[in-house]
């Protein structure tokens, strides 16, 4: 299974196996990783699964749709160029090794 | 240090959240989470969407990995029902006659589909659990062009209709009220959803009840007879309150709880679909059936068990996906006496601002996620938007708040 690394705001890294076709958000929630809230459970409705993609990332990522783009203006922490909603990033073998950084807060 | 023990009756979204939040908030004592389904706690919204469409399986629905519960010291009991609560002895009695003692007990028993009070109801399927969805999927599997009749034009019925239409079946929705989703959204929003369904080829009949269901047929109260290979009902739910009632707790269309979600027994709480609580947003006792309510109440109760005195005041919000329409509501729009529509309804991107006595009570955002999120903040923060402000030509919610700030 693809491995995704979640880096908490305090720098603590957690690596988890994420099933094919699950999302980066679900990889965190299923394993009880704090730092991703996902109030709406993946409906692209709440903006509380905000992550920063690692600046060194070379893995291909899903394209950003309009709803995600708009929601990202309302995240609790500042939107940056590498901001994504993790519920909108499906995981396949291509994302194996992806590193995401979690913001200080989601609410 | 061995902390107090908590028993959560019901392992849906709300019950699971209670257990998860207790651990996240530092609870050290035993937690027992008891559910009557075979599956580990899972999300219900995808049952009418991705799961029904076959785009995800149960593994894509579960709220936590199986190992999570063990890893966090949460005893998950599946396929088991709590049949009684002895408040003097402080034990929950399971169907197998085993008992589990508690220091705190949380009812998260949810709700069940409202029975259809007509002849032939046994031919009608419901859609509430993963088992229900599996039964429906089985009936549709490998076929196209089946005649499917949906009884009830609420969110469940319309989401179901949208997915079944995409699976290339012929769909008719029968709604007894003059408007679909009458309890949940404004007439404007309902009308747009109806138009959208009709443009997809779904037939929607309003103001017509169902008189009877027979094998392969649905008879309407106006005499119409519809051919039906499959009949599914979504006419609302009734809260599961029987155990609470037998335990002597106050029950009135839900387990009645105070602002802290506590019952008359200081050791017993209720959350989620089964709880009837005093809402500052509704100005009275309500029950809410939503993910937002389940998770926020679960979190609030966990804090209450750990000694917090914070009342439950979260703003209700909700979403529904039908075709490519994302409808999101912030606040409770029920009971509005005036609406102002902003945006471009013809393009399918607009928001309906709902007012009561000139006060904004809710926003229905139809493919306008920004209005939804801004609306939540405005409604949470004590809003001063009036119908006159919103009705000004070129009104833009974001710009209006930037000016106000």
Image (tube, coloured by chain):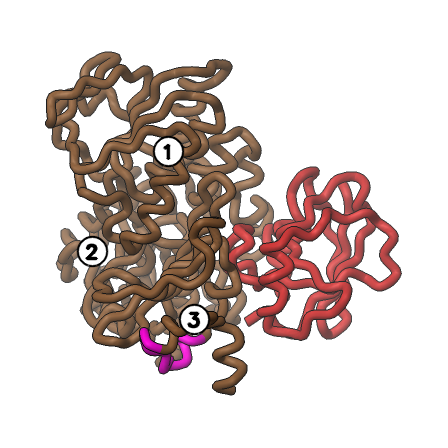
Chain colours: A red, B brown
Look at the picture and state if B207 lies above or below B135.
below
* B103 sits left or right of B322 in the view: left
The alpha-carbon separation of the residues under discs 3 and 1 comes to: 30 Å
Front one among B294 and B316: B316
What distance separates the C-alpha of mark 2 from that of mark 1? Answer: 36 Å
Q: Are marks 2 and 3 on the same chain?
A: yes
The structure residue drawn at horizontal position 43% and vertical position 66%, both measured from the top left corner, is: B299
Is disc 2 surrounded by few (<14), some (14 to 19) or many (20+) residues within 10 Å?
many
Label 1: which secondary element: helix
**What number is the disc on residue B393?**
3
| Residue visible at 38% across and 64% down in the picture | B363
| Chain name for mark 2 | B
Residue B332 position in % (x across, y down): 31, 63
Residue A17 badge: none
Q: In what element is the residue under mark 2? A: loop
Q: How many marks?
A: 3
In contact (CB < 8 Å): disc 2 and disc 3: no
Residue at numbered disc 1: B198
Instruction: Let me know if residue B209 is in the magenta part.
Output: no
N-term-proximal mark, 2 vs 3? 2
Q: In front of the other: label 2 or label 3?
A: 3
């Amino acid at each position: 299974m693809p491995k995704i690394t979640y880096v908490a705001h305090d720098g603590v890294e957690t690596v988890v196996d994420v099933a094919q076709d699950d999302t980066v958000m679900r990889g965190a929630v299923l394993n009880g990783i704090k730092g991703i809230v996902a109030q709406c459970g993946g409906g692209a409705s709440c903006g509380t699964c905000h992550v920063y993609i690692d600046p060194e990332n070379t893995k291909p990522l899903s394209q950003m749709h309009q709803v995600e783009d708009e929601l990202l203006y309302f995240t609790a922490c500042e939107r940056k160029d590498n901001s994504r909603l993790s519920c909108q990033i499906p995981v396949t073998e291509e994302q194996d090794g992806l590193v995401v950084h979690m913001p200080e807060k989601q609410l | 240090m061995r902390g107090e023990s908590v028993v959560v009756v019901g392992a849906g979204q709300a019950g699971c959240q209670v257990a998860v939040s207790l651990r996240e908030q530092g609870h050290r004592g035993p937690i027992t989470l008891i559910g009557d389904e075979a599956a580990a706690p899972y999300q219900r919204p995808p049952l009418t969407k991705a799961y029904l469409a076959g785009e995800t399986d149960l593994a894509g629905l579960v709220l936590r990995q199986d190992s999570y519960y063990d890893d966090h010291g949460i005893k998950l009991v599946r396929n088991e029902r709590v049949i009684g609560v002895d408040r003097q002895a402080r034990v929950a009695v399971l169907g197998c006659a085993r008992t589990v003692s508690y220091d705190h007990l949380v009812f998260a028993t949810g709700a069940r589909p409202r029975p259809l009070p007509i002849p032939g109801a046994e031919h009608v399927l419901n859609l509430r659990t993963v088992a229900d969805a599996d039964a429906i999927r089985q009936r549709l599997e490998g076929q196209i062009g089946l005649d499917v009749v949906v009884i009830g034009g609420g969110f469940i019925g319309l989401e179901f209709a949208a997915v079944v239409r995409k699976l290339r079946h012929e769909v008719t929705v029968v709604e007894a009220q003059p408007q679909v989703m009458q309890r949940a959204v404004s007439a404007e929003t309902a009308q747009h959803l109806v138009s959208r369904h009709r443009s997809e080829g779904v037939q929607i009949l309003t103001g017509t009840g169902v008189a009877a269901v027979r094998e392969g047929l649905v008879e309407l109260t106006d005499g119409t007879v519809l051919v039906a290979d499959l009949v599914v009902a979504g006419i609302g739910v009734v809260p599961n309150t029987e155990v609470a009632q037998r335990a002597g707790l106050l029950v009135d269309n839900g387990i009645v709880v105070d602002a802290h979600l506590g019952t008359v027994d200081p050791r017993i709480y209720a959350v989620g679909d089964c709880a009837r609580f005093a809402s500052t947003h509704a100005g009275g006792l309500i029950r809410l059936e939503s993910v937002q309510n389940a998770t926020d109440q679960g979190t609030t109760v966990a804090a209450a068990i750990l000694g917090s005195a914070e009342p439950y005041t979260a703003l209700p919000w909700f979403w529904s996906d039908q075709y490519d329409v994302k409808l999101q509501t912030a606040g409770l729009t029920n009971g509005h006496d005036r609406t102002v529509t902003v945006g471009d309804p013809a393009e399918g991107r607009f928001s309906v601002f709902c007012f009561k006595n000139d006060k904004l009570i809710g926003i229905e955002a139809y493919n306008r996620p920004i209005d939804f999120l801004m609306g939540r903040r405005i409604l949470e923060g004590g809003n001063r938007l009036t119908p006159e402000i919103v009705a000004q030509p070129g009104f833009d919610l974001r710009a209006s708040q930037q000016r106000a700030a």
